[in-house]
Image: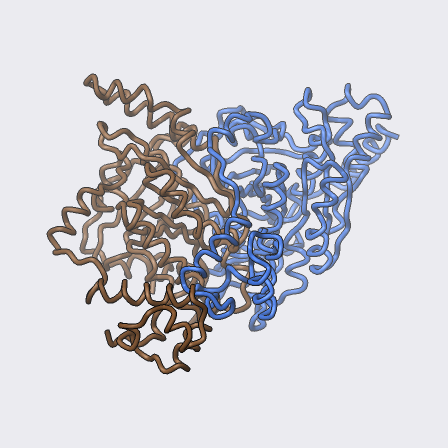
Chain colours: A brown, B blue
Amino acid sequence: MQRPLSSFAFAPAVKVKLINAGFHTAADLCDLRPLQLSKESGISQQEAVEVLQTVRHDASQGAGAGSRMTALELLGREQAMGAIVTFCSALDSVLGGGMPVGKTSEVCGAPGVGKTQLCIQLAVDVQIPVCFGGLGGQAVYVDTEGSFMVQRVVDVAKAAVEHCSLLADDAEQREALKVFTVEDILSKLYLFRCHDYVELLAETYLLPDFLSQHPEVRLVVIDSIAFPFRHDFEDLSQRTRLLNGLAQQLAQMANQYNVAVVLTNQMTTKVGNGQSKLVPALGESWGHAATQRLILHWEGEQRALASGTCSLLTMLRLTHLRFRQGTLLSASAPKQTTTRLEDIWLKNNIQLF
Amino acid sequence: MGSKKLRRTNLSVEICSRLHSHRIETCRDLLSLTPLEVMRVAGVSYSQACQLLKTTSQACAPKMTMAWELWRQKTGLYFPTSLAALDRLLQGGLACGTLTEVTGPSGCGKSQLCMMLSVLATLPHSMGGLDKGVLYIDTESAFSAERLVEIAQSRFPDYFLARERVAEMASRVHLFRELTCRDVQSRLQNLEEDIISCRAGLVVLDSVASVVRKEFDPSLPGNLTHRSNLLGKQAATLKYLAQEFGIPVVLTNQITTNLSDLKPATSFKWNSLEGSSLAAEDSGYVTAALGNTWSHSVNTRLIVQYVDAHCRQIIVAKSPVAPFAVFKYSIQSDGIRLEGDDDQAGPSHQGTDPGLQPIRVRSGFACNLTRGSSAIRDMRGSYS
């Protein structure tokens, strides 16, 4: 009841008039009627009604307006949400069961290492029917770089359908296969092509409405979030502000609509101390934006994936098996966990922090 | 779409005038503000500010398409290069709507490849072409109309028997000579009108690197970021044009020396052939120019390099649809020809960072002068 009026979400002009009329906290307004308020403060009757409704609504909610739950309830909820399995057991184990739904993940990597391939893989894998262990959902793909190739999606989709038909042994699975064809997969993949950061921001404001109209979407991919933000900005502090706002909106969207949000980032060269290192682009503060960070890099002639959220980690080598047929990724056994992340990256001239 | 004026969206006149007094005219200006800032400039409550942002977003957000619709229009997805093994690997040819970069040492055949692709783009659909015009932006003065005609007549001798066809092909290739960064930039800004009026099906920029490296010295502070910004803008403009018109864009790039463990010496220019013997002595290796950020911007990277004095190779270093592969080729009077049997480039699962892939330069060459000049005499005689 002691909440100051300036902290409410009224229009600035209304706030100024209320304060000038002598109303400073919510308690000052408690027994007032709209006509009296409007006469005393000089605001219109409509505005007075809105002000009083907002103040009363806030008072009735009581302290702790956010939801509260115990860790056990949260665990149950997280397990119920599931994860996007990739049919590659080593990769799924590094990711902790698959790409987590309800959280934002970031995939960084050098050019050509396979970030877009991984995203296309996930966009197909999210549609795997529930009886095969998948989520049976749909996917939204926001492409800012033009690297989305529909031929590649067809390759990966064909391989996924083939893999599932080899696995099918009971009637339910065979039934599910009838609606899991290449055409179905392509028709459940929604594509948005953004040419600059303004279109990307606009799309992010409109995505919540899209997701409520399409409640089966379980994956939102933004490939890549770095490209539109890297060349158009003279004012870097504005860029940081916009990126932070974007990160918050995406995290809220992931949580509220139960989708996995996957962002792709690029690498940039940082020159210092006579050495050049590869670091993820978009700056230091962006490093905290996503819940989980995956770094794809080259180790000699192999591609490797590292999970960047802890320093003692499982390093994983990825070999793309039968690239032409777009088969799902296959990986060799994970390396020992005692290798320190920093040592691996120092060897390859990559720096995370 | 970000530059759409707010007056033309569904916002009320009163709000538009309030925003105008704060110099917020376009969708870009409004969407660059946070909701709290919008509350302040528009004088509305928080929920109204969010609604305002949503209305503005609806005015400039992209339309949704389904991947199924893209796949249904089977044609117009790629541009065949007439190099059969390469086309098979790239699943049809150069992908339309994307940027393809050809990089390598000078004299390796980048401009030859560009001219050959220009001829192919003007051919009718029945012969594997696009039946459209070509916009050729030349910054190095490497384009030669005589060579274009020679390639056309040697590669398709039956089709180009009639002189009218040769003339028609040549009139479809529109050449722009730009020599400074600013000229290239303004040409790209106005390219949309040229594409529509020339009915272009292919845009070639030969080369991206030459003007940029002439004008930006990366050792000066701030120049590297300025250069990256300029290249990023060029890439974004070209990608927008490529995607909107559904055409392929081909760019050429140069090479640089990457002195690993030391500061990248991007100012080291490798334009001359004879200086290439230094490559073996330096601790670094030769790689594609313009840096890591540019490697991200292009969608496909083809590297051409020398194997020895007579043999050259084309490497698919970065591609969204093809694995890492190597082909041998040679330059003949009819352009580029792949050599060896078709299966020699088995797709591999390995690869390297396309920005760090080492490129072999020619380490000196022997030239038989008498034989060379008689060959030139023969070529001149054949089409006069």
Name the residue rendered at 33%, 24% in the picture: A180
Give the residue at x 25% y 33%: A134
Between B64 and A40, the one nearer to me in the picture:
A40
The answer to whether residue B177 of the structure is visible from this angle is: yes
Relative horizontal placement of residue A132, taking residue A325 as reference (left or right): left
Vertical relation: B352 (above or below) A278: above
| Image position, residue A182 (x, y; %) | 40, 24
Looking at the picture, does residue B300 appear above or below residue A183? below
The quadrant of the image that shows the C terminus of chain B is: top right
| Residue B207 in the image, given as x and y percentages of width and height | 67, 50
Tell me if residue B73 comes above or below residue B370 in the rendering.
above
The residue lying toward the viewer, choosing from A60 and B324, is A60
**Residue in view at x 19 percent, y 50 percent:** A336
Name the residue located 38 percent from the left edge and 60 percent from the top edge. A349
Q: Position of residue B196 (x, y in %)?
A: 73, 40
Can residue B262 be seen in the rendering of this structure?
no
Seen as rendered, the residue at the extreme right is B384
Residue B170 picture location, percent across and down: 80, 34
- How many numbered tags mark residues here? 0
Residue nearer the viewer, A155 or B377: A155
Q: Is residue B20 left or right of residue B45?
A: right
Image quadrant in which you'd find residue B215: bottom right
